[in-house]
Image: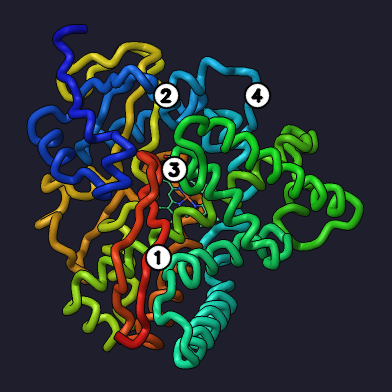
Amino acid sequence: MSERPLADPACFDPDHFAAHGYPHDVWSRMREDQPIAWHDDGIREPFWAITRYADITSIGKDSDSFISSPGVTILRKDQMDQGGAPRVPLMLTMDPPEHHKNRMILRERFKPSVMRALEEHIITRCREIADDVATARIAVAAGASDRIDFVEAIAMRLPLDVILELLGVPTDDRDQMYLWSNAVIGSEDPEYGSVELPRDAILAAQQAMFGYFARFIAERRLSPREDLVSLLVEARIDGEPLSDIEILGFCFLLAIAGNETTRNATSGAMLALIEHPEARAALTADTSTMAPAVEELLRWVTPIVYMARTATRDIDIAGQTVRTGEKVVLFYPSANRDAGMFENPFSLDLSRKPNRHLTFGFGRHSCLGNELARIELRAVLSEILTRFPKLELAGPVSRLRSNFVGGIKHMPIRLDA
Ligand code: HEM
């Protein structure tokens, strides 16, 4: 044990993420000097921190030796000790064969051709969002504050509206879903959750979401439609219908995965463009280059910090032996700045090619919604850049206190800087 190289605690400290954003300098040093390092802060489950691209992909590929079912997040020990709550079935934390059977249910509905058919509708939604922002500008002219929160007025809307529409629940409930989802993902944040009792924040929001979705599940059992809740109600695994808790697990996962990530990618991308005015001007002048630009912005921002896996056998990684039952944490933003994979990884190059970033993970759990997220990001950035070319920061951004999601809570902007 004593020979294990120890990770710099800043690589996983939520207060660091809240105050400064990603600890890229720490991750860079770790990639250089200790690409696998043991992290044990006494507060959370201990784990091996994996920071190099090559090691992350080799672990992601080897899903027999590294499994997801013991949990893909690192819990605080006080959260684990409390026990008690029933575990919700989520495909994210399943292994074969269950994982495959569950993923198959949604696969058809999320395949690229189905998603591309939604593109026009998504573009229309973006226009509506921009119209509402423009209306706010009229309010500014009438004497209201000229500051708008980019997150609440723009970034949060599209991903929530789209996933709620796909699920088949009213988009009018967007603001409520935003609060619940923030409490789950921001459970350790003082504004969204509770620094002292994060587990209570998650459980309360989860219960509220379950109560909400249960109503729609009951309705769709009686009269199914074309939406995802109906698909889940009608789905069969080995000839058996899903139980209510299984369907609730799907709804919960989709409602959260489908909105937190894309929201933070949108805010993070806009911030990156504001900080790189030449790249922004070129993209605004020619939005036909949006597809590779979005890939680079996804690499740059990488909204999910990590996913964890658990070793099923003793296995050597980067010169250390990971023992059976130990967790490894795959730091995706670190992989996306690895000079062994990306030329000049710290420069934002909107035409970068190839761009094999790990923003959507790697292997059998890689993001089911990646095509949808890409379409949403292209649409919303095209609309906002061309409609509000003078949009500028009007104050410091405030960041989520989380070491799991790189969140921007508020980003004050001015439309006519
Ligand atoms: C920029 C936006 C997004 C990012 C960065 C992102 C990131 C990720 C990552 C890293 C994983 C891998 C988990 C692992 O390795 O264990 C994942 C899985 C997943 N994502 Fe996304 N995601 C995004 C958008 C979406 C959207 C829009 C949806 C759905 C509407 C979605 C649904 C899912 C689901 C269901 C899984 C679980 C897949 C499985 O376990 O097989 N994601 N996502």
**Residue 344 visible to an observer of this rendering:** yes
Residue 327: % across, % down: 36, 22
Numbered tag placed on residue 85 in the rendering: 4
Numbered tag placed on residue 64 in the rendering: 2
Residue identified by numbered label 1? 266
Q: Nearer the viewer, residue 216 or 401?
A: 401
Indicate left or right for 314 with 126 as reference. left
Q: Amino acid at mark 4?
A: Ala
Residue identified by numbered label 3? 189
Please tell me which residue is depicted at 53% across the width and 71% down the height of the picture: 116
Q: Is tag 3's residue or tag 1's residue first in the polypeptide sequence? A: 3
- How far apart marks 2 and 3 lie (CA) works out to 34 Å
Ligand 1 within 8 Å of the CB at mark 1: no
Q: Secondary structure at mark 3?
A: loop
Q: Secondary structure at mark 1?
A: helix
Q: Nearer the viewer, residue 301 or 82?
A: 82
Q: Nearer the viewer, residue 161 or 177?
A: 177
Q: Amino acid at mark 3?
A: Asp
Q: Nearer the viewer, residue 3 or 274?
A: 274
Residue 347: % across, % down: 13, 62
Q: Secondary structure at mark 4?
A: loop
10 Å crowding of disc 3: few (<14), some (14-19), many (20+):
many
10 Å crowding of disc 4: few (<14), some (14-19), many (20+):
few
Mark 2 vs mark 1, foreground winner is 1
Q: Amino acid at mark 1?
A: Thr
- How far apart marks 2 and 1 lie (CA) works out to 34 Å
